[in-house]
Image: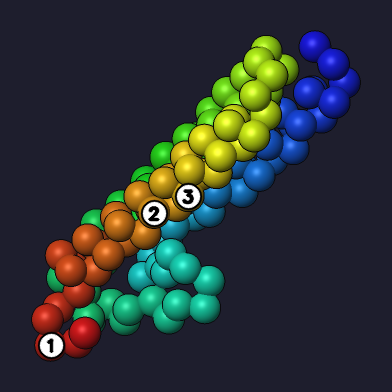
Amino acid sequence: MAAGTIIYLIISLFVSLIFIVLGVNQFRSKVPVALNTGEVPPREDELTDMSEWNHKHGRNLIIYGCALFVTMSVFIYFLEKFDNTVFQMVVFFIVIFGEIAWLELQHSLLKKKLIKKHSI
C-alpha cells in the first residue's frame, strides 16, 4: 500500500469520526439537537418525544460517518485497481450525495413525525 493511500485513509477516518462523534454527542444530548448548520433546533415543548428526536439524529449521523468511511475506502481501492477514473469519480459523487440526501430525508421524516403540528 502506498504512503498516499495510507494518508488518504487516515484523513478519511478523521473526517468520518467527526460525524460519528457528533452523532454520539447528539444521541446523549439532554436538549434538542439540530442536524444542519445554522438550523435552530426545536424547543423541547415543540417535540412530542425529545429523546427519540436526539437518539435518531445521533444514530443517523453515526451511520452516515460509518458509511462515509466505507465509501471513501472502497473508492480508493477501485481507484488503484481500475483505469476509468472519470466514471469512478462520477459514481463516488453520486454515492456521497446519495448519503447526504438520505440524511436530509431522515431529518425531514423526523420533523414530520416528532414536531407538534401547531409549532411548525
Q: Secondary structure at mark 2?
A: helix
Q: Which residue is mark 2?
A: 101
The reply to whether discs 3 and 1 touch (Cβ–Cβ < 8 Å) is no
Q: Residue furthest right?
A: 3
**Circle 1 is placed at which residue position?**
118
Whether tag 2 and tag 3 are in contact, CB under 8 A, the answer is yes
Q: Is residue 108 left or right of residue 32?
A: left
Q: Position of residue 60 (x, y in %)?
A: 38, 48
Q: Which residue is mark 3?
A: 97
Query: Residue at point 48% right, 49% down?
Result: 97
Q: Quadrant of the C terminus?
A: bottom left
Q: Position of residue 5 (x, y in %)?
A: 78, 23
Q: Earlier in the sequence, mark 2 or mark 1?
A: 2
Give the label, 2 or 1, closer to the camera. Answer: 2
Q: Which residue type carries mark 1? A: His
Q: How is the image coloured?
A: rainbow
Amino acid bearing label 2: Ala
Question: Circle 3 — which element?
Answer: helix
User: What's the mark number on residue 95?
Assistant: none
Front residue (pair 119, 8): 8
Q: CA distance from mark 2 to mark 3?
A: 6 Å
